[in-house]
């Protein structure tokens, strides 16, 4: 597993790597033994049910910590409240009475720093019904 140097923003592996062939390879950072590249993985969870959402978050974080990965989160994004006001009367006659409906959408963000092969193992947990999962993977530069 690699070690991320925060200020130099470069990735070093604990395993010995082959030497670069020329200066162009050295500048690009392309080595033959550089398979375990560390990625920044952002998992976005969205649901209308807070209980299911928190359960999936806890399972993901527990799985990542068992693999000894760097985890940040869950970051709780402000709840979206979608409101809809409709007339009770179907024909429009009578007193002006209204029904007010609302749907609350909760969102959580989890950031991981790990090689991409660990993501499949972590996200293979059972996901509760009604929870949407979005995974984005970026390279650490």
Image (cartoon, rainbow, N blue to C red):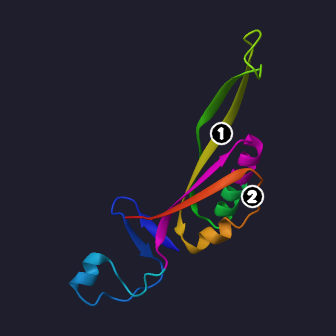
| Residue 34 among those drawn in magenta | no
Q: Residue at 49% of width from left, 77% of height from top? A: 36
Residue 106 in view here: yes
| Residue 50 among those drawn in magenta | yes
- Which of 80/101 is in front? 101
- Mark 2–mark 1 Cα distance, whole angstroms, equals 17 Å
- Which of 30/45 is in front? 45
Q: Residue at 47% of width from left, 81% of height from top? A: 35
Q: Is residue 61 above or below residue 124?
A: above
Q: Are marks 2 and 1 in contact (CB under 8 Å)?
A: no
Badge 1 is on which residue?
105
Bounds of the magenta segment: 36-58
Disc assigned to residue 39: none
- Which of 69/16 is in front? 69
Earlier sequence position, callout 2 versus callout 1? 1
Q: Is residue 62 above or below residue 99?
A: below
Badge 2 is on which residue?
127
Residue 73 in view here: no
Q: Position of residue 3 (x, y in %)?
A: 46, 69
Q: Position of residue 124 (x, y in %)?
A: 71, 67
Looking at the image, residue 39 sits to the left or right of residue 102; the answer is left
Q: Position of residue 136 (x, y in %)?
A: 52, 61
Q: Is residue 71 above or below residue 122?
A: above
Q: Residue at 22% of width from left, 83% of height from top? A: 23
On the image, which quarter does residue 51 sit in? top right
Looking at the image, residue 5 sits to the left or right of residue 47; the answer is left
Looking at the image, residue 89 sits to the left or right of residue 23; the answer is right
Looking at the image, residue 18 sits to the left or right of residue 2; the answer is left
């Amino acid at each position: 597993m690699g070690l991320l140097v925060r200020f130099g923003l470069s990735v070093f592996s604990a395993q010995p790597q082959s030497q670069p062939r020329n200066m162009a390879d050295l500048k690009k950072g392309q080595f033959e033994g550089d398979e375990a590249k560390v990625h920044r993985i952002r998992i976005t969870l969205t649901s209308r049910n807070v209980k299911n959402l928190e359960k999936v978050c806890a399972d993901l974080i527990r799985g990542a910590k068992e693999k000894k990965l760097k985890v940040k989160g869950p970051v709780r994004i402000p709840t979206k409240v979608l409101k809809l006001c409709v007339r009770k009367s179907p024909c429009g006659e009578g007193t002006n009475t209204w029904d007010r409906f609302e749907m609350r959408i909760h969102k959580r963000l989890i950031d991981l720093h790990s090689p991409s092969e660990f993501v499949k193992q972590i996200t293979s947990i059972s996901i509760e019904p009604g929870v949407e999962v979005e995974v984005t993977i970026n390279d650490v530069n």
